[in-house]
Image: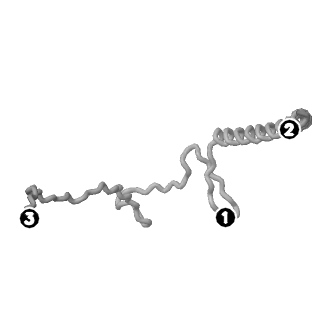
């Protein structure tokens, strides 16, 4: 047997591959500056000593815990209470109406169901 020479193709020159270093967009935030608890005005500046609430906000002192609680304006209280009353009234009315409809339709639906199921058994 004669040996047949193998002819292999020339290997192409491959460039050396380089990978870029991966990067990422890291989220950041602006740091919040919190004043110290013992903050005082600088010398020569007169401190505002009024502990009154801003205009439009009333405060009520709770006798048990001796704390002042802010109350919203009258318009806000009226709107909130009216909305609460209307929503409760609508819910109670809808519930009563639904119960009445169920009570009224139950015998009619039972009779109709018996007639339909009776017709199917007779066939």
Q: Earlier in the sequence, mark 3 or mark 1?
A: 3
Q: Quadrant of the N terminus?
A: bottom left
| Depth order, front residue of 2/70 | 2
- Looking at the image, the residue that sits furthest to the front is 1
Q: Quadrant of residue 123?
A: top right
Q: Are marks 3 and 1 in contact (CB under 8 Å)?
A: no
Disc 2: which residue? 102
Q: Earlier in the sequence, mark 3 or mark 2?
A: 3
| Depth order, front residue of 15/39 | 15
In the displayed structure image, the side of residue 7 where residue 46 appears, left or right: right
Residue 105 in sight in this render: no
Instruction: Report the residue at 29% width, 56% height from top.
Output: 24
Q: Position of residue 58 (x, y in %)?
A: 62, 48
Disc 1: which residue? 65
Residue 24 in sight in this render: yes
Q: Nearer the viewer, mark 3 or mark 2?
A: 3
Q: What secondary structure is marked by label 3?
A: loop
Disc 3: which residue? 2
């Amino acid at each position: 047997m004669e040996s047949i020479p193998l002819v292999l193709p020339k290997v192409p020159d491959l460039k050396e591959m380089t990978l870029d270093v991966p990067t990422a967009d890291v989220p950041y935030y602006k740091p919040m500056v919190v004043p110290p608890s013992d903050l005082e005005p600088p010398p020569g500046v007169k401190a505002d000593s009024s502990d009154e609430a801003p205009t439009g906000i009333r405060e009520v002192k709770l006798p048990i815990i001796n704390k002042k609680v802010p109350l919203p304006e009258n318009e806000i209280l009226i709107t909130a209470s009216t909305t609460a009353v209307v929503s409760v009234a609508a819910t109670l009315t809808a519930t009563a109406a639904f119960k009445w409809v169920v009570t009224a339709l139950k015998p009619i639906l039972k009779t109709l169901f018996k007639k339909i199921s009776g017709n199917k058994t007779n066939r």
